[in-house]
Amino acid sequence: MIGKITTVYGVKGWVKIYSFTEPMSNLLNYSEFKYGKGGNWQSITFDEARVHGKGIIAHIAGVDDRDAARRYCDNDLAVEEVALPPLDEEEYYWHQLQGLKVYSHFGGAEVLLGEVDHLLETGANDVLVVRKCAGSTDARERLIPYVPGQFVGEIDLAAGRMDVDWDPEF
């Protein structure tokens, strides 16, 4: 997901979009989008879009009134993975980290803390939100700073796991 269609804007088929890209204007670099919830994706085309205040507004092609635009609101916005720019080695898109099992190696013992539910952007660094999963040590939600080399060790996307140096008591 690269954003979310949040609400209508005006009366002529425009919507507000919350961009997950950094910077937010990077969302404007894409031309083909999908919208939906829970993996039920449909194509959507914007014939105009621009940064507006702290967000983005866009006109949905073929939609020229507020009520018709409203049916697109509260939907996630995505692009095909092949449209994303390639990353340097050991860089990851957030969606690649979501769902990874998180194993702590604090004190030398391996403990399954849970899985990455989502990430939060903070001023200093991103934060992994780790929630319980089958086999996790407890039901706690953990907030682990995403700082490779300090708290985050090896990430193995193929194996679906991330190793962290994090005290299971936190």
Image (cartoon, rainbow, N blue to C red):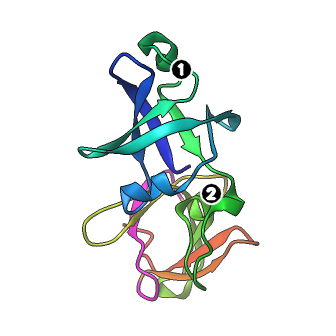
Q: Point out the residue furthest to the top here.
A: 67
Is residue 155 shown left or right of residue 152? right
**Are dots 1 and 2 in contact, CB under 8 Å?**
no
Q: Which residues are magenta?
A: 138-150
Helix, strand or loop status at disc 1: loop
Q: Main secondary structure of the magenta part?
A: loop
Which quadrant, please, contains the C terminus? bottom left
Could you tell which of marks 1 and 2 lies nearer the N-terminus? 1
Image position of 131 with respect to 104: above or below: above
**Disc number at residue 99?**
2
Q: For the residue carrying disc 1, how many other residues have a C-alpha within 10 Å: few (<14), some (14-19), or many (20+)?
A: some
The residue indicated by pointer 1 is 63
Helix, strand or loop status at disc 2: loop
Q: Is residue 148 in the magenta section?
A: yes
What amino acid does circle 1 point to?
Answer: Val
Residue at 58% of width from left, 77% of height from top? 87
Position of residue 137 measured from the top left corner of the image (x, y, whole percent): 56, 61
Seen from the viewer's position, the closer of residues 159 and 12 is: 12
Seen from the viewer's position, the closer of residues 65 and 93 is: 65
Position of residue 93 measured from the top left corner of the image (x, y, whole percent): 56, 66
Residue at 41% of width from left, 29% of height from top? 15
